[in-house]
Amino acid sequence: MRINLKNPATNQFKQCKIGFSWTVFFFGFFPALFRGDWKWTVIILLIDLLTGAWSYGILSGVTNIVFAFVYNKLYVNDLLTAGYQPADSASKDALLAKGFTVQG
């Protein structure tokens, strides 16, 4: 499910998915890198490197599965904390249904 977020201070729009992240499942830290989400890029990359180094990459795949379930929620929470708000009522309803705290 996609939602639309708008930053009222900069008038910047972002369209985000909420729920399971297939891109993180298949590509690890690259979706965070391409979104410019530097904090989670570094965190996912470090965890992948630390777990994969001594397990021949097996645990790195497991961490990607875990992050696939939580990354989109983390990303949307960071955007909401940065001042983004739902751009329409459908996005607000979807966020509330998924348990996000929405202002406005």
Image (tube, helix red, strand yellow):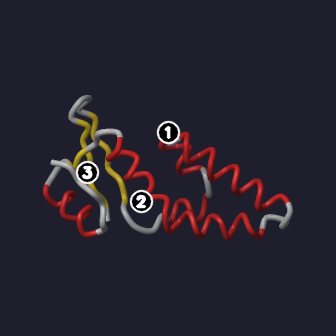
Earlier sequence position, callout 3 versus callout 2:
3
Mark 3 vs mark 1, CA separation in Å: 17 Å
Query: How crowded is the residue under tag 1: few (<14 C-alpha within 10 Å), some, or many (20+)?
Result: few
Q: CA distance from mark 3 to mark 2?
A: 14 Å
In the image, what residue type sits under mark 3? Asn
Q: Are marks 3 and 2 in contact (CB under 8 Å)?
A: no
Residue 25 found in image quarter? bottom right
- Of badges 3 and 2, the one in the foreground is 2
Q: Residue at x 49, y 59 (%)?
A: 71
Nearer to me, 86 or 27: 86
Report how far apart the C-alphas of labels 2 and 1 lie in the structure.
Answer: 16 Å
Left or right, residue 47 beside residue 24: right
| Image-quadrant location for residue 89 | bottom left
Q: Position of residue 6 (x, y in %)?
A: 24, 42
Residue 39 position within the rendered picture, expressed as x and y whole percent measured from the top left: 55, 42
Q: Residues within 10 Å of mark 3 (few under 14, many from 20)?
A: some
Which numbered marker is on residue 4?
3
Q: Secondary structure at mark 2?
A: helix
- Outermost residue to the top: 10
Q: Which residue lies under the disc numbered 2?
A: 73
